[in-house]
Every structure is written in structure tokens, then in C-alpha cells.
Image: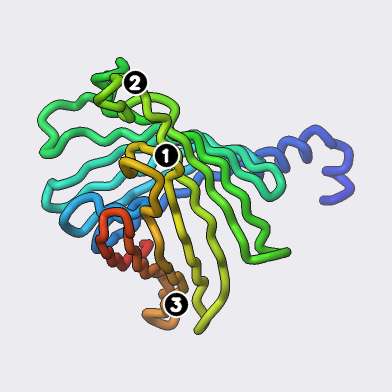
Amino acid sequence: MLIMLSGFPGLLSAQDSLRRHKLDASFDIYTHHLWRGAANGTSVSLQPSVEYSYGNFSAGAWGAWSIDGSYTELDLYAAYSLGSFNVTLYDYFCPVNPVKEFEFFEIRQGTTRHTLDLNVAYARPETHPFGLLIATMIYGDDINPESGRNYYSTYIEPSFHFRLLKSDMKLVSGFTPVKSYYASRFAFVNTGLSASRIVKLARKVNIPAILKLAYNPYADKFHFSFGVTL
């Protein structure tokens, strides 16, 4: 078989290229949806996602829906990784709840419920445990009511990764450097710890689980969430 296929390098190349295309889907269930020091919704959050990837590029869709109707979100994103860096452009769509009208295609500044958020993340776990995320909202529902213009809200999150009790641990200390969507001044808005591990339910049944503990010093609020991936 190897001798026969060696005469068709184009076929082998096409097969190798096809294998590099990946399509993944997942379904998460969280007790609460936590994001950058805030709790979105007041009940269990169902979070489906789908992602296509090819080489260093990936794109996908992610959603969150609180079962009591208190929060709804639908995000699109595109990402490119280069070495230890990952650049992602998110399109967050967060309609007013309860959702009465589907406003997904309303993109005019000042009325849209979309927010474009540009993220640059750095991590090199094979060398050291430190990571860094810098995210800036560049368009959409990030309006300063005093000026009617974008805040360009920026969130910066240093992190520290380590292993403990067979779990992947992550310490974060996220802050906003100026007045923004997150706070009315420089402030730490998201400090906390997360622990993730594979939980064995049966002989051949394992599920990823994650526990999140977060404290927002600016709002003086503590949040807890537990989630599993099906």
C-alpha cells in the first residue's frame, strides 16, 4: 500500500491537509456564568459551543442561557495563535432580558447590543507558570453616557498556573487601568482561583469539571461557580 500511495504525492498531501481541519463541539453546565469579576444571570447557565480549527487559526460560536431567563448571550470569535501568543477577536451579543426581539443584526453604534473585544493572551506553560491577558473593547455596546463615545474599556489579567491535588489551578488578578465598562476608575475587578480536573464517574465515563471562586474588590462582591463539560 505504501508503494502504491508513494506514486500519488498529491493524494497524500490532500489527505494530510484534510486531517488538519477539525470541528469540535461541547456543552457546559455552570451553576452561574462568571465573567471578569461579574455574575451574569441568577440561575444555572447552559453553555453550548462549536469550533472549527485549521493549523493556527480557529473560529467558533459560544452561547450562554440562564434557565430562569435572566441572561442570554451569543458570541462569535476568530483567533490566531503564534508561538506563545494568541490573538482573538470576540463579538459579544448580549440582548436585553427577557428577550422580546431578536436584535442580532442591529449593528449601529449607540443601539447595537454587540461588543467587539480584541484579546491578546500570552502563556508559555512549558517554561514558566505566568500568563497575561490584555483585552480592549473596540466597538459596540461600550458607550460612555457622558460623551456618547466608546470607553475602549480595557481589562488586564495577570495569571499564575500550577498543579495541586491532581488539579490544574489558576490564580488571577484582573484590573481595569482607567474609567471603563468595568469600573469608574482604576480598580481590581476580578481576583480569584479556579481548579479544573477530570472526574471519573464510571469505568469509562470521565467528565471535565471546574470550580471557580472570584472576588471583585471594586464591587465588594464574592462569586462562586461550579461547572462540568458534557
Q: Nearer the viewer, mark 3 or mark 1?
A: 1
Q: Earlier in the sequence, mark 3 or mark 2?
A: 2
Asked if marks 3 and 1 touch (Cβ < 8 Å), the reply is no
At numbered mark 2, what does the secondary structure look like: helix, strand or loop? loop
Look at the picture and state if 42 lies above or below 136.
Answer: below
Judged left or right of residue 169, residue 207 is left
Asked if marks 2 and 1 touch (Cβ < 8 Å), the reply is no
Instruction: Identify residue type, mark 3.
Output: Lys
What residue is shown with label 2?
A: 149
**Mark count:** 3
Alpha carbon separation for disc pair 3 and 1: 50 Å
Instruction: Identify residue type, mark 1.
Output: Val
User: Residue 105: horizontal and vertical position, in percent?
Assistant: 29, 20
State the residue in front, 25 or 150: 150
What residue is shown with label 1?
A: 178
At numbered mark 1, what does the secondary structure look like: helix, strand or loop? loop
User: Residue 49: horizontal and vertical position, in percent?
Assistant: 38, 47
Image quadrant in which you'd find residue 100: top left
Alpha carbon separation for disc pair 2 and 1: 15 Å
Image quadrant in which you'd find residue 129: bottom right
Judged left or right of residue 120, residue 214 is left
Look at the picture and state if 179 lies above or below 42.
Answer: above
User: Residue 183: horizontal and vertical position, in percent?
Assistant: 32, 44
Q: Nearer the viewer, mark 2 or mark 1?
A: 1
What residue is shown with label 3?
A: 204
User: Residue 114: horizontal and vertical position, in percent?
Assistant: 32, 28
Q: Nearer the viewer, mark 3 or mark 2?
A: 2
Alpha carbon separation for disc pair 3 and 2: 54 Å
Q: Earlier in the sequence, mark 2 or mark 1?
A: 2
- Say which mark, if any, is on residue 209: none
* Mark 2 nearby-residue class (10 Å; few <14, some 14–19, many ≥20): some
Residue occupying image coordinates x 30% and y 20%: 147
